[in-house]
């Protein structure tokens, strides 16, 4: 065979291989370091810090945390069962008594399934009923004419359907129909920069429903919506290789790696995404536990849909804590960050001095301690998000957007982003 023939043969082989989405042969050392970043979070067992996503991510990965995993699941069970099965607390502002959100409850059900457990018995039935009530409330908020919006988000709506599906719990056609309509009329779903995450979660829910055949009368519509979601995610790939942005890529890849419709476009897009992820792992981009827990399954060719029939006997390498770096005895370097607030009157601009390496949340706290700046946050699945700035609470169809001046939206949350010296951060109240 001549050189040209050999080249054509090689390209033909690559074309055949690249029709499916595979994220394989990623540097095992980088994957191990990623898993090590979850270990400190597994020592945080207070109810407000427990995150079922951490347990799910590890169980679907090729890594394990040994006895720490079992202890973490036990803590999850105690916290979620106690909080959901006790009577509703009085409205006294006691956050410690707050019940889990729909998204948190859905992730807890995924965690049970990751341990090869099906919800059952009186307590399990009550958990399922609570999640179904959440979905019914969301459906009512969307309305018969689809002019409304979920009380939480379509992301949590899709996650709720997925969690019930992997437990083989049927969701009413009318509940599934709202998510199908949102995908079919994408303006309902694509409202901001999180649209790829939302699309991916909807796609994972549809994948589970298609494989489980829990809603046979909607099977054709579900299959069409699933293909539409895949097409939209592929079109959202950036020149660097990410789907949407670096942080929405893991969930998008969970969907794409399970695709039953292989194409050359799909395969090549995933090869490009793999290269981008390798670079991100080398630069330690992933620090948020939710994002890490969504990425670890991808690096093991798994997704949340695999919880339909999880392999709880698969061998997994034991994670050892990362070696501690000796403390450096030196005076901390300080940086100056300009904090700007717009969209309210009067506006606010102030320079804040903080130690280098501080998070944006640290910057906001410093500004609050030393001036008239005020802010409030609310816990979410991916960390705290701003709900109020300078006493102005984001209203219905409003949110506080965080930008690198002049107009670049932050891709990380306030607890994860580390501003640079001289940077201007703008908090802008916007409507959607």
Image (cartoon, rainbow, N blue to C red):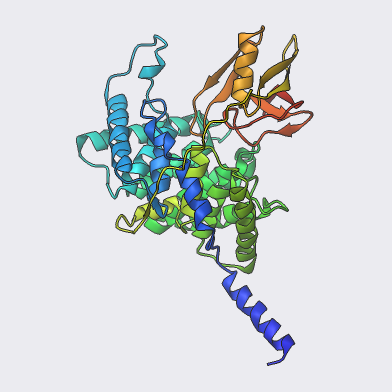
Q: Is residue 283 visible?
A: yes
How far from the left and from the top, in percent, is residue 49? 42, 28
How far from the left and from the top, in percent, is residue 319? 40, 48
Count of numbered badges drawn on the protein: 0
Quarter of the picture containing the N terminus is: bottom right
**Picture quarter containing residue 403?**
top right
How far from the left and from the top, in percent, is residue 34? 50, 46
How far from the left and from the top, in percent, is residue 255? 52, 54
Specify the farthest residue to the left: 121
Quarter of the picture containing the C terminus is: top right
Q: Is residue 135 visible?
A: no
Vertical placement of residue 159 versus 9, above or below: above
Is 416 displayed left or right of 340 in the figure?
left
Considering depth in this image, is 5 or 122 the residue closer to the camera? Answer: 5
Considering depth in this image, is 191 or 181 the residue closer to the camera? Answer: 191
Is 8 displayed left or right of 139 in the figure?
right
**Picture quarter containing residue 267?**
bottom right
Specify the farthest residue to the bottom: 1
Specify the farthest residue to the top: 372
Specify the farthest residue to the right: 406
Q: Residue at x 65, y 46 (%)?
A: 244
Vertical placement of residue 267 versus 418, above or below: below
Q: Residue at x 61, y 78 (%)?
A: 13
Is 320 displayed left or right of 264 in the figure?
left
Vertical placement of residue 219 versus 10, above or below: above
Considering depth in this image, is 274 or 125 the residue closer to the camera? Answer: 274
Q: Residue at x 47, y 34 (%)?
A: 139
Q: Residue at x 52, y 62 (%)?
A: 24
């Amino acid at each position: 065979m001549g050189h040209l023939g050999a080249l054509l043969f090689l390209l033909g082989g690559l074309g055949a291989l690249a029709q499916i989405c595979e994220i394989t042969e990623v540097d095992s050392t980088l994957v191990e370091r990623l898993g090590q970043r979850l270990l400190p979070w597994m020592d945080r067992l207070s109810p407000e810090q427990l995150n079922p996503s951490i347990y799910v991510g590890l169980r679907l990965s090729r890594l394990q945390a040994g006895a720490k995993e079992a202890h973490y699941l036990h803590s999850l069970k105690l916290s979620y069962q106690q909080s959901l099965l006790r009577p509703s607390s009085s409205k006294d502002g006691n956050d410690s008594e707050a019940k889990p959100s729909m998204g948190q409850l859905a992730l807890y059900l995924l965690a049970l399934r990751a341990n090869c457990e099906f919800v059952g018995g009186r307590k399990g039935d009550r958990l399922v009923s609570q999640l179904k009530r959440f979905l019914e409330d969301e459906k009512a908020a969307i309305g018969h004419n689809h002019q409304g919006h979920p009380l939480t988000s379509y992301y949590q709506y899709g996650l709720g359907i997925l969690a019930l599906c992997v437990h083989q719990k049927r969701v009413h056609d009318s509940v599934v129909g709202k998510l199908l309509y949102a995908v079919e009329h994408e303006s309902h779903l694509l409202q901001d920069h999180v649209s790829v995450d939302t699309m991916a979660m909807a796609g994972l829910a549809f994948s589970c429903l298609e494989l489980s055949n829990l809603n046979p009368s909607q099977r054709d519509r579900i299959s069409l919506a699933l293909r539409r979601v895949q097409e939209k995610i592929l079109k959202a790939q950036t020149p660097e290789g990410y789907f949407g942005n670096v942080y929405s890529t893991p969930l998008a890849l969970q969907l794409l790696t399970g695709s039953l419709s292989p194409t050359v476009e799909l395969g090549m897009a995933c090869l490009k995404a793999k290269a981008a992820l390798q670079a991100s792992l080398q630069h330690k981009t992933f620090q948020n536990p939710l994002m890490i827990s969504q990425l670890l399954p991808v690096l093991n060719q798994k997704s949340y849909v695999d919880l339909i029939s999880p392999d709880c006997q698969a061998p997994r390498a034991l994670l050892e804590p990362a070696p501690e770096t000796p403390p450096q005895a030196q005076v901390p370097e300080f940086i100056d960050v300009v904090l700007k607030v717009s969209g309210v009157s009067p506006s606010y601009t102030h320079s804040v001095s903080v130690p280098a390496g501080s998070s944006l949340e640290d910057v906001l706290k410093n500004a609050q301690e030393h001036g008239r700046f005020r802010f409030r946050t609310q816990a979410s699945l991916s960390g705290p998000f701003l709900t109020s700035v300078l006493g102005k609470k984001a209203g219905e169809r409003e949110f506080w957007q965080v930008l690198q001046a002049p107009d670049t939206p932050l891709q990380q949350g306030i607890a994860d982003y580390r501003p640079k010296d001289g940077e201007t951060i703008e908090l802008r109240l916007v409507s959607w």
